[in-house]
Amino acid sequence: MVKKIFGQIYIWLILILMYLPVLVLIAFSFTESVNVGEWTGFTWNLYPRLFNSPEILTALGNTVLIAVISALGSTIIGSLGAVGAFYMKRKWKNAIDLMTQIPVVNAEIVVAFSLTVMFVFIGNLVNAYIFSFWTLLIGHMCLSIPFVYISVKPKLIQMDPSLYEAALDLGASPTQALGKVIVPEIIPGVLSGFMLSITLSLDDFIVTAFTRGNGLLSGDKKIETLSTLVQAKIKKGPIPPEMRALTTLLFVLVVIAVIGVTLYRNHQAKKIKNRRAF
């Protein structure tokens, strides 16, 4: 009984520590005070002001574009890599598993710095400044691919290995078997990896700061994302209060997306369970 009470208290304490700062930002998105903690009256004005701020909208657009594009690329490469590794010999499979686990536990600053050194080296070889949207995209994909691999791998392990072989025996080509047999089985892991890739990209700062160049909505200027914009604003003074409104909208969208993915995964799991029951 005591352990159960202690466990519940511990869980609620962790949840409060995790979500209380977010709830505070949400609450202060309905007041125009510059500093969080100063309540100047309830208002919705920060939300219209948010959509009238070209600087924030440009950073938001850049952040969303790089997140979606890098997540799509990471999901395709990571999923295909997981499928390919799954059907490899054990020694090669173990080697790839080890290689994908290292970036997950490695410090992000190491990844960012190593990518920067590589891009500088390549730039010196071609005698050109190569930092651009493409270097930023490569950086975000390097950050996300291992997480997609890890998300897809358990679904492959749960899959009946005879399904793919049965499809080939029935006349399907390897590509058809991949699309009609394997992909439907691993789609929950693929979606989880995609959502995780978007999340990693949205809140990344270190890799972005090290690998960004000119392009996207910033045009000829260096690409500005929400993380780099906040960091730049902190150097000069208080963060624009409109950012609190943006934080609230992002939090609501993420909650809706997580609920949607969870419901979809539960629905797919029930379908698979019912199909196997028959």
Image (tube, helix red, strand yellow):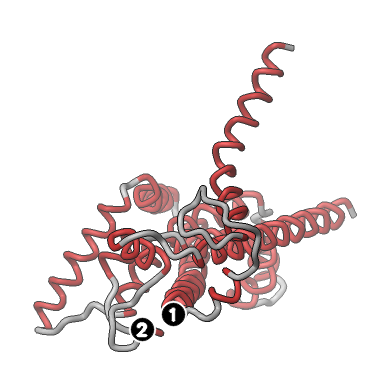
Of pointers 1 and 2, the one earlier in the residue sequence: 1
Q: How many marks?
A: 2
Amino acid type shown at disc 1: Thr
Give the SS element for disc 2.
helix
Q: Nearer the viewer, residue 182 or 163?
A: 182
Name the residue located 59 percent from the left edge and 63 percent from the top edge.
190
Q: Is residue 28 above or below residue 179?
A: above
Name the residue located 46 percent from the left edge and 68 percent from the top edge.
74
Judging by the rendered image, the residue that carries numbered circle 1 is 58
Cα–Cα gap, marks 1 and 2: 7 Å
Amino acid type shown at disc 2: Ser
Name the residue located 72 percent from the left edge and 73 percent from the top edge.
170
Q: Does the rendering let one see residue 34?
A: yes
Marks 1,2: beta carbons within 8 A: yes
Residue 189, given in percent of the width and then of the height, sits at 61, 58
The furthest residue to the top: 2
Assess disc 1: are there few (<14), some (14-19) or many (≥20) residues with their C-alpha within 10 Å of its C-alpha.
some
Label number found at residue 218: 2
Give the SS element for disc 1.
helix
